[in-house]
C-alpha cells in the first residue's frame, strides 16, 4: 500500500506539478536524461521565441495598429519623393 501511494505521488502529483516530467526508475538513465532535456527545451521554447522575435509580441502589434489608425503616416524619407 505504501509503495503504491509513493508511486501515485511520484507519477501523478509530481508529474502534474512539473508539467509532465518525472523520473522513471524502470527506464535507463539515458532515457530519463533525454526526457528531462526535451522537457526543459519545450519549457523554454516559447520564451526563447518571444525574446528572439519581438515583432510578434502583442505590444508591438497593438502599437502599430494604433499608430496606423490614429493618425496619417508621414511620407518615408526613402521613397524618393
Image: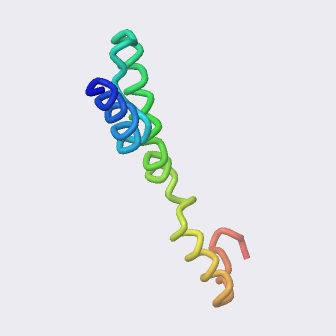
The location of residue 13, given as percent across then percent down, is 36, 40
Q: Is residue 58 above or below residue 75?
A: above
Residue at 39 percent of width and 34 percent of height: 40
Total numbered badges shown on the rendered structure: 0
Q: Is residue 51 above or below residue 8?
A: below
Residue at 44 percent of width and 52 percent of height: 51
Which is nearer the eye, 2 or 13? 2
Residue at 64 percent of width and 89 percent of height: 70
Residue at the front extreme? Answer: 1
Which is nearer the eye, 27 or 78? 27
Horizontally, residue 3 falls left or right of residue 49, namely left
Residue at the top extreme? Answer: 28
Residue at 42 percent of width and 41 percent of height: 19
The location of residue 76, given as percent across then percent down, is 65, 74
Horizontally, residue 75 falls left or right of residue 49, namely right
The location of residue 69, given as percent across then percent down, is 68, 85
Amino acid at each position: 500500500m505504501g509503495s503504491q501511494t509513493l508511486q501515485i505521488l511520484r507519477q501523478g502529483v509530481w508529474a502534474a506539478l512539473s508539467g509532465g516530467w518525472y523520473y522513471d526508475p524502470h527506464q535507463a538513465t539515458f532515457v530519463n536524461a533525454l526526457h528531462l532535456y526535451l522537457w526543459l527545451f519545450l519549457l523554454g521554447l516559447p520564451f526563447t521565441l518571444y525574446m528572439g522575435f519581438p515583432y510578434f509580441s502583442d505590444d508591438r502589434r497593438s502599437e502599430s495598429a494604433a499608430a496606423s489608425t490614429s493618425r496619417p503616416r508621414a511620407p518615408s524619407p526613402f521613397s524618393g519623393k
